[in-house]
Image (spheres, rainbow, N blue to C red):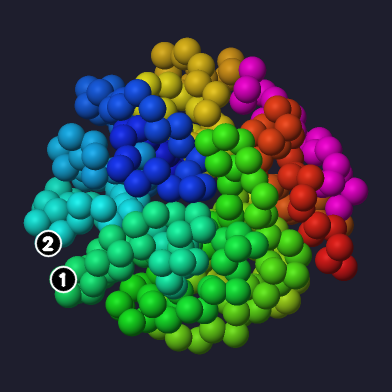
């Protein structure tokens, strides 16, 4: 295991169009449970803990939790929309020991960003504050879809403008209503892959491990980047990472909200029927993956089929990577 994600809260004021979270109930993970899960993660050699929501800044114990993670020698990354972010909040995050700050931005304009996310002005304001503070470990989370793929280089220019060190390319996931109508096609993925290959500026660009279609294309066009991780692994659910839900339950990842009642992560990994099904799916993928040329190294997001079709198996039906020869 490399890392875990902890869902801190279901509270969020933005209610973005393509949010995958069910923002109901106003739940916060109890601090004592979060700390217990962190202690357990430490025993299993976890190096990184990602903190997400909802809106992470809505979590009332955020700074105390980050401080606790830091005291254990674990790195914490926090994902923010930019809502309610100012210099005081940044100083509190830094003093608590946060490692990385990821700002969500899906477009270079309010119009493009608004196709999937609200709060464009919040994100830009946060980037300005982070630049002024000269905080070094700032990143942009850019979720790629068929709606914004041709805006990628404009987002890179924004990153350059505000001295952002990193952009992480993330594949669009089904929303909270299990709808997904804008998964990028092969042409669109190749377009962004070529942008990444040809870019030589100061911003590092990485692709999340659960977007293996993009990694496969990058490899096919001869791109090598030392910052790309898990390039032949893909979906890391219960292999390299797991998730703690806002209810303190173990789930395979933040997009596979299938909580089960187990007392420890060891028990979960050994006895969970969901974990068993995930491993079976990865070892024996169905179509369109089964006959794809890249079946042995491309392990796509499992959550897509679960949310769209009610079945847990590899490879979303709309993926056309098989066309790449």
| Residue 10 x, y percent position in the rendering | 35, 32
Q: Secondary structure at mark 2?
A: helix
Badge 2 or badge 1: first in the primary sequence: 2
Residue 39 location, quadrant: top left
315 vs 258, left or right, is right
Q: Is residue 93 above or below residue 260?
A: below
Numbered label attached to residue 218: none
Circles 2, 1 touching at the beta carbon (< 8 Å): yes
Q: Is residue 19 above or below residue 281?
A: below
Q: Secondary structure at mark 1?
A: helix
Is residue 245 one of those drawn in magenta?
A: no
**Mark 2 or mark 1: which is in front?**
2
| Residue 171 x, y percent position in the rendering | 58, 55
Q: Is residue 310 above or below residue 107?
A: above
The one of 5 and 311 positioned closer to us in this rendering: 311
Is residue 280 one of those drawn in magenta?
A: yes
The one of 284 and 108 positioned closer to us in this rendering: 108
Numbered label attached to residue 87: 2
209 vs 299, left or right, is left
Residue where numbered disc 1 is placed: 133
Task: Work out whether residue 70 can be spotted.
Answer: yes
The one of 261 and 238 positioned closer to us in this rendering: 261
Near mark 1 (Cα within 10 A), the count class, few <14, some 14-19 or many ≥20, is: few
| Residue range (magenta) | 273-292
- Residue, x 26% and y 53% (percent of image)? 83
Residue 313 location, quadrant: top right
Q: What is the count of numbered marks? A: 2
Q: Is residue 267 above or below residue 255?
A: above
């Amino acid at each position: 295991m490399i890392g875990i994600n902890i869902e801190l809260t279901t509270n969020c004021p933005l209610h973005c169009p393509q949010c995958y979270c069910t923002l109901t109930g106003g739940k916060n993970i109890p601090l004592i449970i979060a700390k217990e899960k962190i202690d357990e993660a430490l025993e299993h050699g976890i190096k990184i803990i990602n903190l997400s929501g909802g809106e992470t800044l809505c979590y009332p114990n955020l700074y105390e939790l980050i401080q606790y993670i830091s005291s254990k020698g674990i790195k914490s990354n926090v994902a923010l929309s930019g809502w309610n972010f100012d210099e005081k909040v940044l100083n509190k995050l830094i003093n608590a020991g946060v490692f990385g700050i990821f700002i969500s931005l899906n477009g270079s304009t309010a119009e493009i960003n608004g196709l999937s996310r609200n709060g464009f002005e919040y994100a830009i304001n946060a980037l300005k504050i982070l630049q002024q503070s000269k905080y070094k470990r700032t990143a942009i989370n850019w979720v790629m879809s068929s709606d914004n793929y041709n805006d990628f280089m404009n987002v890179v220019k924004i990153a350059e403008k505000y001295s952002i060190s990193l952009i992480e390319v993330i594949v669009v996931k089904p929303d909270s209503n299990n709808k997904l109508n804008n998964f990028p096609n092969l042409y669109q993925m190749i377009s962004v892959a070529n942008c990444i290959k040809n870019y030589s500026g100061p911003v590092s660009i990485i692709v999340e491990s659960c977007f293996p279609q993009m990694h496969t294309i990058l490899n096919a066009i001869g791109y090598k980047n030392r910052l790309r991780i898990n390039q032949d692994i893909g979906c890391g659910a219960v292999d390299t990472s797991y998730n703690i839900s806002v209810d303190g339950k173990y789930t395979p990842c933040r997009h596979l909200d299938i909580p089960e009642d187990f007392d420890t992560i060891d028990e979960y990994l050994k006895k969970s029927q969901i974990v068993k099904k995930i491993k079976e799916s990865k070892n024996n993928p169905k179509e369109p993956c089964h006959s794809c040329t890249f079946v042995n190294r491309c392990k796509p997001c499992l959550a897509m089929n679960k949310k769209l079709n009610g079945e847990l198996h590899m490879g979303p039906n709309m993926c056309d990577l098989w066309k790449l020869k």
